[in-house]
Image (cartoon, rainbow, N blue to C red):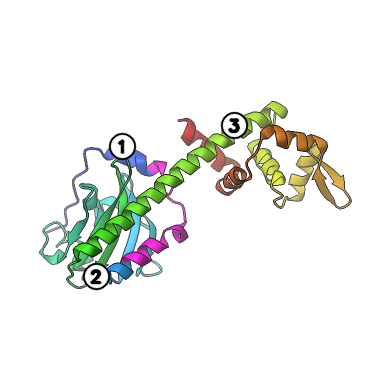
Amino acid sequence: MNFEPASIPSNDDKRVKAVVRTGVLDVASTELYEIYCFLAKEITGCPVSWTGVIDSDRQFMLARDGFPEDAPMEMPRNQTLCQFALEKTKPLLINNMTKDKRFMFHPAVTDFGVKFYAAFPIVTSDGYILGTLCVSDNKVRRLSRHKINLLTKLAAKLAYQLEVQVTQRKATAEASIEIMNKLTSYFNDITIKNAISVLKFFINDTLSQEEKKVMLDLGIAINVETSIEISKYGNKLQQELNLNIGTIKRIKNLTNNEDELMNMLGQIES
């Protein structure tokens, strides 16, 4: 017999939109989520742990522990174990996968000998399952109620972190729109690339020679010996913009290039 994929949840379209809103797909930021995998292993004693989100076609790994270094960071959704954890918000606990009809023919079981699998859904405040925090082992296991509660809370903490990141990203994009509107009122033809350079200048970030020339051309900087300093006009502009340094740094971190900023603004405006 062959492995049969899980049925598609009735709310999957809305669920996938919630996944996309997180902004984590195809973003290499494992350092933000490695702690969850480490703690999941420590709590359960399992040798393998991973966490990821699932869109309409695939599972994208946020972090993992116990996998081969060359293991892919994503897998087709219909080949994953975690697709079955999208059906309910409660943990999916499979003590012996060789005895479970849903999993007994999965390659993880037949080819790699996985027996124990536990998936803890990452659930948003709106009730959408973004993905899972999982552990597995090649021997039969049974988690205590205490460990199940701890892993459930850990997955809830991860869900909260992802939602906070969405809120922060939205606030940053809204601030970006406001700043761009103000800058274009001063400089009609300013590009997003040059606007980012202006923000970098205002937080004393390192500028390229090209960016320094832009500051001089815009009149917000003046030449002082071998460097540039903010001009009176630049000081006035900085005050008019009423810039929050923390927001500027988030904008700079999120927007390494013009296309990225345009994508971010587009997501907020759509």
Question: In the structure shown, which secondary structural element does the residue marked by tag 1 occupy?
Answer: helix
Q: Which residue is mark 2?
A: 137
Real-space Cα separation, disc 3 to disc 1, in angstroms: 29 Å
In which quadrant will I find the C terminus?
Answer: top left
Q: Which residue is mark 1?
A: 14
Q: Earlier in the sequence, mark 1 or mark 2?
A: 1
Q: Is residue 107 left or right of residue 245?
A: left
Real-space Cα separation, disc 1 to disc 2, in angstroms: 33 Å
Q: Is residue 269 left or right of residue 102?
A: right
Q: Is residue 146 above or below residue 138?
A: above
* Amino acid type of the residue tagged 1 in the rendering: Lys
- Is residue 154 among what the camera can see? yes
Q: Is residue 162 magenta?
A: no
**Residue in front for this viewpoint, 105 or 206:** 206
Mark 2 or 3: the one toward you = 3
Q: Earlier in the sequence, mark 3 or mark 1?
A: 1
Q: Name the residue at 36% across, 63% down.
A: 37
Question: In the structure shown, which secondary structural element does the residue marked by tag 2 occupy?
Answer: strand
Real-space Cα separation, disc 2 to disc 3, in angstroms: 51 Å
The picture places residue 228, in percent across and down from the top left corner, at 82, 47
Q: Which residues are magenta?
A: 20-40
**Residue in front for this viewpoint, 74 or 242:** 242
